[in-house]
Image: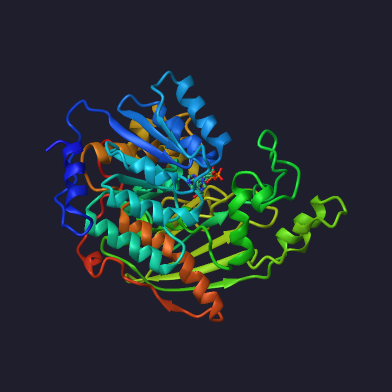
Amino acid sequence: MRRRDFLAGSAALGASALLPAFPAPARGERLRLGMIGTGMRGQVLLTELLRRDDVEVAALCDIEPIMLGRALAQVDKAGKPKPRAYGQDRDENAWKRLLEPGGLDGVIIATPWEWHAPMAIGAMQAGVAVGCEVVAGITLQDHWDVLDTQLRTGTPYMLLENVCYRRDVMAALRMVREGLFGELVHLQGGYQHDLRAVKFNSGDPDQPYGSGVEFGPGGWSEAHWRTAHSVNRNGDLYPSHGIGPCAMYANIHRGNRFIRINSFASKARGLHEYTVARSGGTTHPSTRVQFRLGDIVTTTLACANGETIVLQHDTSLPRPYSLGFRVQGTRGLWMDVNQSIHIEGRSPAHQWQDFKAYQDEFEHPLWRRHAGVAAGAGHGGMDWFVVNAFVEALKAAAPMPIDIYDAVAWSAITPLSEQSIAQGYATLDFPDFTRGAWATRTPIFALSDAY
Ligand SMILES: NC(=O)c1ccc[n+]([C@@H]2O[C@H](COP(=O)([O-])OP(=O)(O)OC[C@H]3O[C@@H](n4cnc5c(N)ncnc54)[C@H](O)[C@@H]3O)[C@@H](O)[C@H]2O)c1
């Protein structure tokens, strides 16, 4: 069965039908992909799609005409056919029209977080495979709804968690799998990125950053929508860059699972201080906003196999970027903040060694194979890998390497962490989204030759 016939058939069957495995496109056929959200992140992902000969960018949607225009210009500059375009009328439901004509094999969703669940559900119901940026939903119920739609429709869904493909993160994965750290005991990671200049800007699309304290309707790009989450929510708002690699190290959903979670939030000071300092002594309305998001949110997870995982969300204070990874087992540990490692028996007693030599020795086979083509892609090459994995898995009709269970469990850390904080830092049961299947599933991430 050709993919397009399958898609037409599945639409006719309706959302509740149990569908056969998603078919691969015919040999030599290019994947027809769409993109919803062509903002700053969408444009980076689009660059990766336009570099490929096996993909046709068939449709784009954004409700901000400047962003849509920039994406269309990218396609034109790459000498590729003009895609269908949606959203010029600023209709926030224009994405539904993008899905309507059929013929799309997949869609990449790079919109504000609150849109990810409805857009992914709509696409899966239309039989269009989903590559979703790194938040699956807002509420816990959103996560169950996204999961159940995927299970019911059989439409592929991948969370586009690029940090899982970071070069050092993947070398460490190889070291974990080869037993260098012994038995894993403890993991750490997080999102430690000073976003103050992203959350507030001038609102000028040509020169947004470096000045201004606008957000909401007057802010540009993420200041337009992301800052509101810091006003209204208190929890780990962005867990997947940290938990993704840790979950792969610990084989979560593949012989292991999260069983308990709690979060603590510090006081909120950074964003207010920033607006006061940057507003030049004025009484700009941003200086009067009360931010709920604690400056440092620390989340602890316990796993069925006895490991603990600590995540930190730290986006409102001055600091250099670091995701703060730590992989620790019975024979040693790696930490990314100082790029240092200690392995008992290899390292001098009680001393750190530079990770560089280990990076070379334990380079992951995927990086060994693809470093040339990935070089120059976004975020040190990892954006090439994540797009490549989505495209190759779709072409092969193979399981997504970061699948629906990973997506919903990693992303559900946010509402669970909000709930824990709201209940006085309570420790909560972590839902088993796999409904028991975690015990018998086996690892697949980064184990194929191609992706
Ligand atoms: N993986 C990464 O490294 C990475 C990096 C940056 C951002 N992101 C994620 O990517 C997503 C987008 O972030 P961004 O930085 O591009 O933000 P952005 O604000 O620059 O882009 C979002 C775009 O979505 C559009 N949009 C909003 N509502 C829409 C709707 N109903 N229909 C169509 N388009 C709509 C906006 O007009 C905007 O252009 C977020 O989920 C963010 O967390 C991931």
Residue found 81% across the figure and 54% down from its top: 277
Q: Say if residue 251 shows up in the picture.
A: no
Q: What quarter of the picture does the N terminus occupy?
A: top left
Q: Is residue 433 above or below residue 34?
A: below
Position in image of residue 97 (x %, y %): 38, 42
User: Which residue is outermost to the left?
Assistant: 1
User: Which residue is outermost to the right?
Assistant: 281
Left or right, 416 with reference to 269: left
Q: Say if residue 422 shows up in the picture.
A: yes
Position in image of residue 215 (x %, y %): 68, 52
Q: Is residue 189 above or below residue 79?
A: below
Residue found 40% across the figure and 64% down from its top: 142
Position in image of residue 209 (x %, y %): 69, 40
Q: What quarter of the picture does the C terminus occupy?
A: top left
Residue found 21% across the figure and 38% down from its top: 396
Image quarter of residue 137: bottom left
Q: Decide which of 326, 194 is in the foreground and name it.
A: 194
Residue found 38% across the figure and 56% down from its top: 181
Position in image of residue 22 (x %, y %): 19, 45
> Number of marks in the image?
0
Image quarter of residue 50: top left
User: Which residue is outermost to the top?
Assistant: 79
Q: Decide which of 93, 432 is in the foreground and name it.
A: 93
Q: How is the image coloured?
A: rainbow
Left or right, 435 with reference to 282: left
